[in-house]
């Protein structure tokens, strides 16, 4: 109720002319499931991301940006609210973003922005609360939003950019600035890159039949339960397929950048390219991104381009979290005073008052949908093996992972970036110190009042989640 009152008063204020919309446009692109270390500008040895590299050369690259969770819904909640998932109430136990939250799109609308969202992942749906504040919200998995049947060459992501380009052209000459959000899901399993990218990144010598089989994997569940054993060669194939998808996603980002440039608004647009989480490609004998706090699943890319606030060609190694995105947008756009709960000047990445963070955190609640899937699809598998919460504290040189009821892991990231040697028993003092900080941080944050689990009735959205391996 209080949030709605704030909205009404703000709209009334705008109507009588007591607020002037800030000037920069905003384009926030989330490349779903893109891990940071597969970008060429992050040091990867293959030319996967020439367009993002070029954007980083004219903007700022954050080399230590991390998701707040290992999967889509909680991490997008952090992007939209500047809160950790348990604070926003958008977790694996609730499966929606509660309406009581004030979202970034809502604040931008109140600030006079024209707001639009284009989404390819149905975890980020209107039904689940993510359309709050968007004047237009286009769910690309719906047949009504598709002008042709999606396939490999004409994916949902390609059709999405086909819609984004003319939208940018149509609004670029308007008096109102715009806020455009796009979720592009191409780097998510299954990995089926278009032929030109497949040919560029798939090594010779693989069994074509095995390549086709692995390109059909929709999730890591069958591997988890032992039905789909994977060899080192299989991991290499998956890695090559993934690289092809990364390059394809990069080309789509390039098309959006070109559309902004053609419209003459690129230099007056805050462009943010990031991801909601990463992906395992054989590390710790895992694929996909389920129930993991290891860096392949949490380390995400972050490139920000806006010449007036972000230095060109700068690489910043400070610890950054997805919760920093919303306050950064509001700070740059001068809209922070409209939603102080989403913005603090010291949180904005553009603020000279921001100090280096001593640590960042991530976490996940009990995986309701995963448990249900195992119970129904793999009744012989012990579903209790995944029935626990995860927490993570990451400092510059060390990382602690807490597995509810299953112990603690501690890693020296400086010496062991692959997180292969658990030092929890060898360094008990460090373990206790970091566990104390993690516990106090969660206690201090508090949690949302709304805890119920959301049950979807949207068959088109559910069908997409089935195709991605999330539900049975």
Image: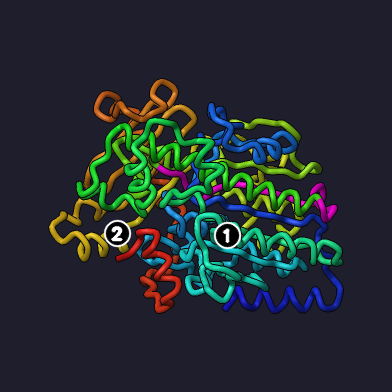
Closer to the camera, 48 or 410? 48
User: Looking at the image, which residue sits at the far left?
Assistant: 380
Crowding at dot 2, Cα within 10 Å, few <14 / some 14-19 / many 20+, comes out as many
Q: Secondary structure at mark 1?
A: helix
> What percent of the width, then of the height, locates residue 465?
40, 64
Q: Which quarter of the rendered picture does the C terminus lie within? A: bottom left
Q: Which residues are magenta?
A: 262-279
Q: Disc 2 marks which residue?
A: 370
Placement of 226 over or under 433, stated as above or below: below
Q: Residue at x 43, y 53 (%)?
A: 71
Instruction: Report if residue 267 lies within the magenta region.
Output: yes
Residue 209 is situated, as x and y percent measured from the top left of the image, at 33, 44
Q: Residues within 10 Å of mark 1 (few under 14, many from 20)?
A: many
State how far apart marks 2 and 1 are (Cα): 24 Å
Q: Where's residue 175, x and y in %?
A: 86, 66
Identify the residue at image location x=56%, y=63%.
119
| In the rendered image, the vertical position of residue 387 relative to residue 453, given as above or below | above
Quadrant of residue 337 in the image?
bottom right
Q: Which residue is drawn at the image coordinates 22% and 47% (left, top)? A: 405
Horizontal and vertical percent for residue 322?
A: 55, 48
| Residue 293 forms part of the magenta stretch | no
């Amino acid at each position: 109720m209080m949030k709605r009152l704030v909205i009404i008063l703000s709209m009334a204020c705008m109507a009588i002319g007591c607020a002037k919309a800030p000037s920069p446009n905003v384009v926030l692109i989330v490349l779903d499931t893109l891990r940071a270390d597969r970008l060429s500008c992050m040091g990867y040895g293959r030319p996967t991301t020439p367009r993002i590299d070029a954007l980083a050369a004219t903007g700022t690259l954050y080399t230590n940006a991390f998701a707040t969770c290992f999967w889509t819904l909680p991490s997008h909640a952090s992007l939209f609210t500047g809160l950790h998932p348990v604070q926003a109430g958008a977790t694996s136990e609730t499966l929606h973003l509660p309406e009581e939250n004030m979202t970034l799109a809502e604040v931008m609308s109140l600030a006079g922005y024209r707001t639009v969202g284009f989404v390819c992942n149905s975890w980020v749906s209107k039904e689940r609360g993510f359309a709050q504040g968007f004047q237009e919200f286009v769910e690309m998995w719906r047949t009504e939003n598709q002008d042709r049947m999606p396939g490999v060459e004409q994916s949902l992501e390609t059709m999405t950019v086909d819609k984004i380009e003319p939208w940018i052209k149509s609004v670029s000459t308007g008096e109102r600035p715009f806020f455009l959000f796009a979720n592009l899901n191409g780097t998510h399993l299954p990995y089926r890159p278009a032929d030109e990218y497949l040919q560029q990144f798939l090594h010779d010598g693989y069994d074509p039949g095995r390549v086709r089989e692995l390109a059909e994997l929709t999730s890591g569940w069958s591997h988890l339960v032992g039905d789909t054993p994977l060899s080192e060669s299989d991991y290499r194939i998956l890695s090559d397929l993934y690289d092809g998808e990364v390059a394809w996603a990069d080309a789509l980002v390039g098309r959006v950048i070109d559309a902004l440039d053609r419209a003459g608004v690129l230099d007056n647009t805050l462009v943010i390219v990031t991801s909601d989480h990463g992906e395992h490609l054989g590390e710790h004998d895992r694929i996909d991104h389920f129930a993991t706090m290891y860096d392949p699943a949490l380390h995400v890319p972050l490139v920000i381009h806006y010449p007036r606030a972000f230095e060109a060609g700068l690489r910043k190694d400070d610890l950054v979290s997805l919760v920093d995105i919303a306050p950064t947008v509001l700070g740059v756009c001068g809209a922070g005073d409209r939603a102080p709960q989403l913005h603090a000047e010291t949180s904005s990445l553009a603020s000279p008052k921001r100090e280096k963070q001593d640590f960042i955190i991530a976490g996940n609640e009990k995986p309701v949908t995963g448990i249900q899937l195992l119970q129904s699809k793999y009744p012989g598998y012990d579903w209790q093996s995944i029935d626990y919460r995860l927490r993570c504290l990451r400092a510059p040189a060390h990382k602690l992972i807490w597995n509810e009821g299953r112990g603690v892991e501690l890693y020296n990231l400086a010496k062991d970036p692959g997180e292969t040697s658990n030092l929890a028993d060898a360094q008990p003092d460090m373990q206790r110190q970091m566990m104390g900080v993690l516990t106090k941080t969660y206690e201090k944050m508090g949690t949302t009042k709304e805890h119920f689990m959301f049950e979807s009735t949207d068959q088109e959205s559910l069908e997409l989640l089935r195709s991605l391996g999330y539900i049975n």
